[in-house]
Amino acid sequence: MTEAPFELAIERYIDAPPETVFAVWTQRPEEWWAPKPWTTKIIEQDLRPGGRSAMIMTGPDGASSPMEGVVLEVVPNRRIVFTNAFTAGWVPQTPFMVGIFTLTPEGKGTRYRAASRHWDEATHRQHEAMGFTQGWSIVADQLAALAEAAARTGT
Protein backbone atom coordinates (compact mmCIF):
# COMPACT_ATOMS: atom_id res chain seq x y z
CA MET A 1 0.00 0.00 0.00
CA THR A 2 1.45 3.36 -1.05
CA GLU A 3 1.42 6.08 1.54
CA ALA A 4 -0.22 9.34 0.57
CA PRO A 5 1.66 12.60 1.10
CA PHE A 6 1.26 13.91 4.63
CA GLU A 7 0.11 10.54 6.03
CA LEU A 8 0.82 9.19 9.49
CA ALA A 9 -0.04 5.54 10.16
CA ILE A 10 0.33 2.72 12.63
CA GLU A 11 -0.21 -1.00 12.06
CA ARG A 12 -0.53 -4.01 14.27
CA TYR A 13 -1.68 -7.59 14.23
CA ILE A 14 -4.79 -8.29 16.28
CA ASP A 15 -5.42 -11.93 17.24
CA ALA A 16 -9.12 -11.78 16.39
CA PRO A 17 -10.99 -12.06 13.09
CA PRO A 18 -11.89 -8.85 11.22
CA GLU A 19 -15.58 -9.30 12.09
CA THR A 20 -14.77 -9.17 15.80
CA VAL A 21 -12.40 -6.21 15.44
CA PHE A 22 -15.03 -4.35 13.38
CA ALA A 23 -17.73 -5.08 15.98
CA VAL A 24 -15.55 -3.73 18.80
CA TRP A 25 -14.43 -0.72 16.70
CA THR A 26 -18.02 0.23 15.86
CA GLN A 27 -19.93 -0.83 18.99
CA ARG A 28 -17.51 -0.07 21.84
CA PRO A 29 -15.51 3.08 20.94
CA GLU A 30 -15.99 4.64 24.38
CA GLU A 31 -13.89 1.76 25.77
CA TRP A 32 -10.87 2.17 23.49
CA TRP A 33 -10.88 5.41 21.42
CA ALA A 34 -8.89 7.64 23.84
CA PRO A 35 -5.57 6.73 25.46
CA LYS A 36 -6.31 5.99 29.12
CA PRO A 37 -6.71 7.81 31.47
CA TRP A 38 -8.52 9.97 28.88
CA THR A 39 -12.15 9.02 28.20
CA THR A 40 -14.41 9.31 25.18
CA LYS A 41 -18.10 10.16 25.15
CA ILE A 42 -19.85 9.41 21.87
CA ILE A 43 -22.40 12.06 20.95
CA GLU A 44 -23.32 10.41 17.66
CA GLN A 45 -21.67 7.79 15.47
CA ASP A 46 -23.77 7.28 12.32
CA LEU A 47 -21.65 4.77 10.42
CA ARG A 48 -22.86 5.37 6.89
CA PRO A 49 -21.53 7.68 4.16
CA GLY A 50 -22.59 11.20 5.13
CA GLY A 51 -23.30 10.18 8.72
CA ARG A 52 -22.29 12.36 11.65
CA SER A 53 -19.32 11.44 13.82
CA ALA A 54 -19.26 13.47 17.03
CA MET A 55 -17.49 12.78 20.30
CA ILE A 56 -15.77 14.46 23.21
CA MET A 57 -12.47 13.27 24.63
CA THR A 58 -11.82 14.30 28.25
CA GLY A 59 -8.52 14.19 30.08
CA PRO A 60 -7.92 13.38 33.74
CA ASP A 61 -7.56 17.11 34.49
CA GLY A 62 -11.00 17.83 33.00
CA ALA A 63 -9.73 19.34 29.75
CA SER A 64 -11.92 18.28 26.85
CA SER A 65 -11.45 18.00 23.13
CA PRO A 66 -14.64 17.86 21.05
CA MET A 67 -14.37 16.22 17.63
CA GLU A 68 -16.95 16.58 14.88
CA GLY A 69 -16.86 15.13 11.39
CA VAL A 70 -18.54 13.12 8.69
CA VAL A 71 -18.24 9.44 7.80
CA LEU A 72 -17.14 9.00 4.19
CA GLU A 73 -17.04 5.23 3.73
CA VAL A 74 -17.90 2.07 5.63
CA VAL A 75 -17.13 -1.37 4.26
CA PRO A 76 -18.28 -3.77 7.00
CA ASN A 77 -15.42 -5.78 8.51
CA ARG A 78 -12.85 -4.11 6.21
CA ARG A 79 -12.71 -0.29 6.23
CA ILE A 80 -13.97 2.90 7.88
CA VAL A 81 -13.11 6.39 6.60
CA PHE A 82 -14.08 9.73 8.12
CA THR A 83 -13.04 13.37 7.92
CA ASN A 84 -13.34 16.46 10.05
CA ALA A 85 -13.38 18.70 6.96
CA PHE A 86 -17.16 18.90 7.40
CA THR A 87 -19.74 18.71 10.13
CA ALA A 88 -23.10 17.00 9.62
CA GLY A 89 -25.02 18.37 6.64
CA TRP A 90 -21.73 18.96 4.76
CA VAL A 91 -21.00 22.21 6.55
CA PRO A 92 -17.31 23.01 5.86
CA GLN A 93 -14.96 23.56 8.76
CA THR A 94 -11.21 23.96 8.93
CA PRO A 95 -9.97 20.49 8.00
CA PHE A 96 -7.38 18.65 10.04
CA MET A 97 -7.42 15.11 8.70
CA VAL A 98 -9.02 12.13 7.03
CA GLY A 99 -8.94 8.99 9.20
CA ILE A 100 -8.67 5.67 7.35
CA PHE A 101 -8.98 2.42 9.28
CA THR A 102 -8.47 -0.88 7.48
CA LEU A 103 -8.98 -4.44 8.71
CA THR A 104 -7.24 -7.03 6.55
CA PRO A 105 -7.56 -10.76 7.25
CA GLU A 106 -4.20 -12.24 8.24
CA GLY A 107 -4.09 -15.87 9.27
CA LYS A 108 -6.65 -16.29 12.05
CA GLY A 109 -6.47 -12.60 12.92
CA THR A 110 -6.48 -9.11 11.50
CA ARG A 111 -3.87 -6.68 10.24
CA TYR A 112 -5.16 -3.38 11.64
CA ARG A 113 -4.00 -0.13 10.02
CA ALA A 114 -4.99 3.31 11.26
CA ALA A 115 -3.92 6.23 9.07
CA SER A 116 -4.38 9.95 9.32
CA ARG A 117 -4.01 11.97 6.12
CA HIS A 118 -3.55 15.72 6.21
CA TRP A 119 -4.04 18.50 3.70
CA ASP A 120 -0.61 20.04 4.17
CA GLU A 121 2.80 19.55 5.75
CA ALA A 122 2.12 21.96 8.62
CA THR A 123 -0.93 19.99 9.81
CA HIS A 124 0.92 16.71 9.30
CA ARG A 125 3.78 17.93 11.49
CA GLN A 126 1.34 19.31 14.08
CA HIS A 127 -0.39 15.92 14.42
CA GLU A 128 2.95 14.15 14.62
CA ALA A 129 4.12 16.57 17.37
CA MET A 130 0.84 16.01 19.27
CA GLY A 131 1.98 12.41 19.77
CA PHE A 132 0.22 10.65 16.90
CA THR A 133 2.36 7.51 16.96
CA GLN A 134 2.22 7.02 20.72
CA GLY A 135 -1.47 7.95 21.10
CA TRP A 136 -2.79 5.98 18.14
CA SER A 137 -0.62 3.00 19.15
CA ILE A 138 -2.10 3.06 22.66
CA VAL A 139 -5.67 3.10 21.35
CA ALA A 140 -4.82 0.31 18.89
CA ASP A 141 -3.54 -1.73 21.85
CA GLN A 142 -6.77 -0.99 23.74
CA LEU A 143 -8.85 -2.02 20.70
CA ALA A 144 -6.76 -5.19 20.31
CA ALA A 145 -7.21 -6.17 23.98
CA LEU A 146 -11.00 -5.83 23.73
CA ALA A 147 -11.23 -7.64 20.36
CA GLU A 148 -8.94 -10.47 21.49
CA ALA A 149 -10.95 -10.94 24.70
CA ALA A 150 -14.18 -10.95 22.69
CA ALA A 151 -12.73 -13.54 20.28
CA ARG A 152 -11.67 -15.80 23.16
CA THR A 153 -15.05 -15.62 24.91
CA GLY A 154 -17.24 -15.47 21.80
CA THR A 155 -18.88 -12.22 22.91
Image (cartoon, rainbow, N blue to C red):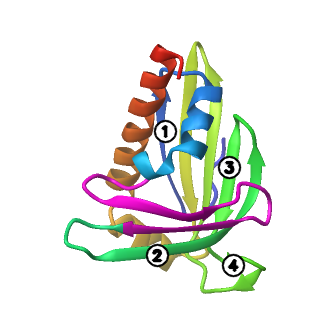
Q: Which residues are magenta?
A: 33-57
Q: Give the left or right position of residue 127, taking residue 95 as reference.
A: left
Q: Please, what is the three-letter code of the amino acid marked with disc 3?
A: Ile
Q: Earlier in the sequence, mark 1 or mark 3?
A: 1
Left or right, 133 with respect to 153, comes to left
Foreground tag (1 vs 3): 3
| Residue 38 inside the magenta-drawn segment | yes
Calculate the distance from the C-alpha at mark 1 to the C-alpha at mark 3. Answer: 15 Å
On residue 86, which mark appears? Answer: 4
Q: What residue is drawn where x is 80% and y is 60%?
A: 49
Residue 107 found in image quarter: top right
Q: CA distance from mark 4 to mark 3?
A: 16 Å
Q: Vertical placement of 79 versus 126: above or below? A: above
Kind of residue at badge 2 = Pro
Q: Amino acid at mark 1?
A: Glu
Q: CA distance from mark 4 to mark 1?
A: 27 Å
N-terminal of the pair, mark 3 or mark 2, is 2
Reading the image, the residue beneath label 3 is: 80
Give the amino acid at mark 4.
Phe
The answer to the question of whether label 4 and label 2 lie on touching residues, with beta carbons closer than 8 A, is no
Residue 134 % position (x, y): 32, 52
Callout 2: SS: strand
Q: Which residue is mark 1?
A: 11
State the residue position of label 2.
Answer: 66
Most distant residue in the left direction: 61
Taking the spot 32% from the left edge, 53% from the top edge, the residue there is: 35
Q: CA distance from mark 4 to mark 2?
A: 14 Å
> How would you rate the neighbour count of disc 4 (Cα within 10 Å): few for under 14, some for 14-19, many for 20 or more?
some
Instruction: Find numbered disc 4 in the image and state the secondary structure of the residue it sits on.
Output: strand
